[in-house]
Amino acid sequence: MKRKSFLAGAVCAGVLALAGQAHAQAWPNKPVKIVVPFPAGGATDVISRALGQRLAAELGQTFVIDNKPGAASAIGAELVARSPADGYTLLMATSSSLVNNRFLYKKLSYDPDGFELISLVCVTPLVLVANTSLPGDNVSSIVQYAKANPGKVNYASYGTGTISHLATALVAQRSGVSMAHVPYKGASEALPALMGGHVSLYTDTIVSSVALIKDGKIKPIGVTTAKRTAILPNVPTIAEQGLPGFDMVPWYGVVAPKGTPKEVVERLRVAMAKVVQSPEFVAELAKTGAEPPSGGFGPAEFAALMKSEITKTAALMKDAGIEPQ
């Protein structure tokens, strides 16, 4: 009886393994959706579309970009977390969806740890930009103007608690100046508000703002990275401008719902590794200011980055005075 039970169990395990392999070989046999938790036209959208096109070529199936903005990326993240774990619904995750929202909401509608980490894609330096009519072209002069004109300088972000919000809030906090925060759903809303004079400042990704900077429609004040970026070499870092140690860089990575078959996860990881590390893809994103992550792309590197960011963001939220809602 024991032998029969053992053999039956072995046969069952073998069948399940073969079924998993068959599922992986069949995947993807229909379009795959990448949910982008920000509006079309912003950095997350631009990066996702570039990635989707190359994954489609690599895997021979259409990758559809589905924009689901709102609630500092929580709407899109929740949608993916509750989707079937079959490899056909993925999330282009950011620091907002997997890190910042832990501290932003008392009760989050999804578990930020409830995803399979597939691969990091890139990082994108942020740049503090200003309406062209705002006096001053550096951090010091703008801070002086804000102090001399209480209530006249405000700033946009692409969502409360996002790195866009935290970066400007930290500049204000470390400079000892008070500025009102005006949150938007994404760059496609915040940039028109900035150009229209509805807000004075905005910390944006270089990906979505560089063209407007070069056209003179907004003016750059400083980049948030520790070193200057190649795409805007003449723009000084914020750290250079009296705020030493200032270094905030958003990242992007693809995740799947927890429980996605490991064979599908592995096939996607292999395809992504080939795409995101290809010279062609790196060169394509470099034109927008995006860069490869310094620590690597894989799931282990992804997990290590998240762990580091959680510790860092907890302190930033506290410094910025942001309480969970």
Image: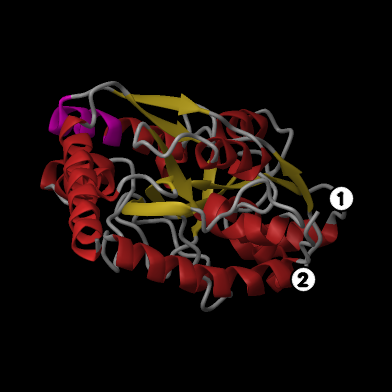
In the figure, is residue 202 to the left or right of 53?
A: right
Where residue 252 appears, as percent x and y from the top left, is: 40, 50
Q: Magenta-highlighted stretch: main secondary structure?
A: helix
Look at the image and tell me in which quarter the N terminus lies.
bottom left
User: What's the amino acid at mark 1?
Assistant: Gly
Q: Is residue 124 visible?
A: no
**Residue 92 falls in which quadrant of the image?**
top left
Query: Which residue is at a point 21% across and 39% down the rendered structure image?
Result: 19
Kindly report the distance in space between the C-alpha atoms of the residues bearing marks 2 and 1.
14 Å
Start and end of the magenta stretch?
A: 51-60
**Residue 186 covered by magenta stretch:** no
Which residue does the numbered mark 2 point to in the structure image? 176
Sequence-first disc among 2 and 1: 1
**Residue 54 covered by magenta stretch:** yes
What is the total number of numbered labels drawn onto the structure image?
A: 2
Query: Which residue is at a point 55% across and 29% down the rendered structure image?
Result: 68
Look at the image and tell me in which quarter the C terminus lies.
bottom right
Where residue 28 appears, as percent x and y from the top left, is: 24, 29
User: What's the amino acid at mark 2?
Assistant: Gly
The colour style of the image is secondary structure
In the figure, is residue 32 to the left or right of 71?
A: left
Where residue 293 appears, as percent x and y from the top left, is: 31, 60
Q: Nearer the viewer, residue 260 or 16?
A: 16
| Pointer 1 local density, CA inside 10 Å: few below 14, some 14–19, many at least 20 | few
Q: Nearer the viewer, residue 157 or 38?
A: 38
**Number of the label disc, if any, that sits on residue 217:** none
Where residue 6 appears, as percent x and y from the top left, is: 22, 61
Which residue does the numbered mark 1 point to in the structure image? 151
In the figure, is residue 254 to the left or right of 60?
A: right
